[in-house]
Image (cartoon, rainbow, N blue to C red):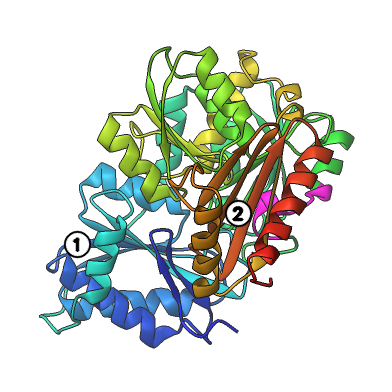
Amino acid sequence: MLKHPLESISGIRGIYPDSLDIHYVFLTSCKFGRYLDGREVAVGMDTRQSSVLLKKAAISGLLYSGSSVIDLGITTTPEVFRYTKKHGIKGGIMITASHNPKEWNGIKFIVDARGPTEDKLQKIIETECTYSNAGELKKGDSSEYYSDIVDFIGKDSARDLVLALDAGGGSVVYNAPAMFNELGAKVILINGSPGIFSRVIDPTQDSLQNLSNIVKKTKCNIGFAFDCDGDRLQVVDSEGDKLPPDFTLAAALQNVPPYSRVAISVDTSEAVMQIARERKLHVYISPVGEANVVDTMLKNDCVLGGEGSSAGVIDPSFSFCRDGLLAAAHILKNFNQKKLPAKELFAQHYTIRTKIQFDRNTAFMVLKNLKKKYPDAITVDGVKIVLRNGWCLIRPSRTEDVLRLSAESDSKEQAEMILDNIKHEIASIGVSS
């Protein structure tokens, strides 16, 4: 059982109420308010049952610290990022555990329209919670985000397309169907009851069989599935096949002008890198994690960034956030323009991603030993071992007590072999999973 919240640039997450409760959220939100010196903060939440109590605790902590609060109610994470950027609001808090199981919840901080880096997060956590004159509480509306996407992508960009939308019980259910209608698509909605999670919340980890069946039965052009807070997107094609999560980032790269600079996380398929090379893009490799990708983008003046492993796309001209809804709108436009990458490309670069339970200290012991054994490995994030027939990446999760393993090769069999070999490597250095 997780005893303490996990604190990382991906947010603070824990199991409610065992390792994350209202007292912790009040205190941490108060610290955040003091860190911002009482500046205004926008607060949103996802559709988990625990989010209502935790949002109230966060608002209370912020008000206690002297910050004024704009309560956005139930939102997606990308909405809160966009709202703070568009309106020049110093801080934001999203109550969500994103793609984690429903028993989890968490706090995602926003500072200057982006997620905090490791050093800033540490400063927030170390800030003392002290009382200041209570700030003002008011209601806000972040739903303008959806019309902003329509304006950004172009009205009727998805004209005559039929879309199956799996909301997964998450907060996209409230406004996303109407947005896709505005883009010109006909929408067939499933799992549209907020807070009812009838599948794995992370759509990249679920079979999405219901969505696949709907796509085939109703002859949809495409299917989209989202996680609880709308930042993660999984695509299903017209044949009902679940495409690799890397497809989303690969599709986004199709819109980037040649010779542009892009930031891509280390756990991304070689298929994406192949498209980047074909488009003559300058690629900067980032550690995994939205804030890390954004940091790499800003340092290198990149026009796009993303993570293949989490189906994440970040367009800084819109917001500094992994945005599944914006990525979905781009994909619909690309579909009509016949600019989507061929799924056969991903069959040639077969990727397997899995995880094994590890406490954090043990995970770091594994990495230390692997670095000694493979001195030529890429260590941007964890240990990435480049092999003659593919690669494997071993890294500790920032959101769970697990060790994440990825392997890629030119076939499923070869990728499975690489993955099995690395598991044996972990056992051979004297650490059991």
Span shown in magenta: 200-210
Residue 285: quarter of image: top left
The residue wearing badge 2 is: 227
**Whether residue 204 is situated above or below residue 336 in the rendered picture:** below
> Residue 236: percent from the left, percent from the top?
74, 37
Q: Between residues 403 and 207, which one lies in front from this camera angle?
A: 403
Q: CA gap, disc 1 to disc 2? A: 28 Å
Q: Is residue 287 above or below residue 424?
A: above
Would residue 397 be seen by someone viewing this image from the given angle? no
Q: Quadrant of the C terminus?
A: bottom right
Q: Which residue is mark 1?
A: 40
Q: Position of residue 5 (x, y in %)?
A: 45, 77
Residue at 60 percent of width and 42 percent of height = 177
Is there a contact, CB below 8 Å, between mark 1 and mark 2? no
Residue count near mark 2 (Cα–Cα under 10 Å), binned few <14, some 14–19, many ≥20: many
Identified at 54% across, 37% down, the residue is 179
Tell me if residue 207 is in the magenta stretch: yes
- Residue at point 51% right, 23% down? 253
> Would residue 24 be seen by someone viewing this image from the given angle?
yes
Work out whether mark 1 precedes mark 2 in sequence or the reverse, and give the earlier one.
1
- The amino acid type, in three-letter code, at marker 1 is Glu
Residue 124: x %, y % from top left = 24, 69
Q: Amino acid at mark 2?
A: Asp
The quadrant of the rendering that contains the N terminus is bottom right
Is 90 situated left or right of 74 in this image?
Answer: left
Question: Which is nearer the eye, 261 or 311?
Answer: 261
Mark nearer the viewer, 1 or 2:
2
Secondary structure beneath disc 2?
loop
Judge by depth and name the residue closer to the eye, 178 or 420.
420
Res 417 quadrant in image: top right
